[in-house]
Image (spheres, helix red, strand yellow):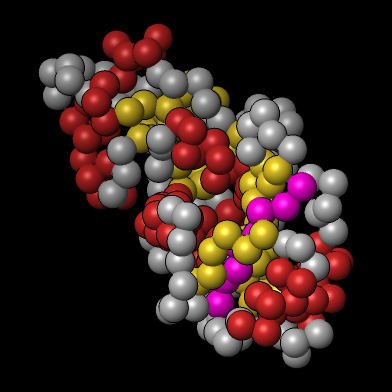
Amino acid sequence: MTAAELISHLILPLQITDTVQTAQERMTEFKVTQLPVLREGQFCGLIREEQLLHPAGDQLTTLDKELLQVFVSEGVHIYELIMLMNKLQVDLLPVLDMNQQYLGVVSFQELLPAVSAMFALRDPGGIIVLEISNRNNSLAHMAQIVEADNAQILSSYVQDFPDSTRMEVTLKINKTELSGIIASFERYNYLVKAVYNGTVADNGTADRYNLLMSYLNV
């Protein structure tokens, strides 16, 4: 799924001739803390709520040089959108086409349903977190282990550790009784770091999982 498919047409951009008061009112209306600013249809930049300290009647032209030059192209994948929003701590990202024409914005709230569906977050089941060597990262083998217990992997997520040959693989599985699958992973020398099925959680991974769930607001 790409930025072009996730554009929200409900959040309207500001014009460079709009006033500070208009910007404040729009942010309140759309429940965001940033908005794109246009000049005759061309993207000027992203304005943040904390920049709106000028007199209410001032036009946004007074803030032209302070606008944040952040945008994405229409073909950017949803993974990159999430990472960029998290890195920049923004509610939305302006989307431009190949000719640098403004198309709209992707908002964090618009991402939530897509992310939830992609990671099967709302589907019933359990989660197993494995730590493996980056040389032993065959998802096909992991799927075979899970399927041998009459289960399926609904989604997976891989996280690399900086300056390490180890990585963490999170598997969402369509059942909560995971003891047989865990035993199989351990039999094949996989390190099971944590299990989330209402019974087991260790090594601090629970905190990281809860943080992710909080970030995704699910």
Q: Is residue 127 left or right of residue 44?
A: right
Tell which residue pokes out farthest to the bottom in this image: 150
Which corner quadrant of the image does residue 57 belong to?
Answer: top left
Q: Nearer the viewer, residue 63 or 40?
A: 63
Q: Answer whether residue 10 is visible to the viewer in this image.
A: no
Q: Is residue 107 visible?
A: yes
Q: Where is 148 relative to 128, above or below? A: below
Which of the image's four quarters has the N terminus? bottom right
What are the residue bounds of the magenta stretch? 126-133
Residue 199: percent from left, percent from top: 44, 78
Q: Is residue 107 magenta?
A: no
> Front-most of 17 and 104?
104
Rendered residue at 38%/22% (across/down): 16
How many numbered discs? 0
Residue drawn at 45 percent across, 66 percent down: 201
Residue situated furthest left in the rendering: 55
Residue at 58%, 87% in the rendered image: 177
Q: Position of residue 49 (x, y in %)?
A: 26, 30
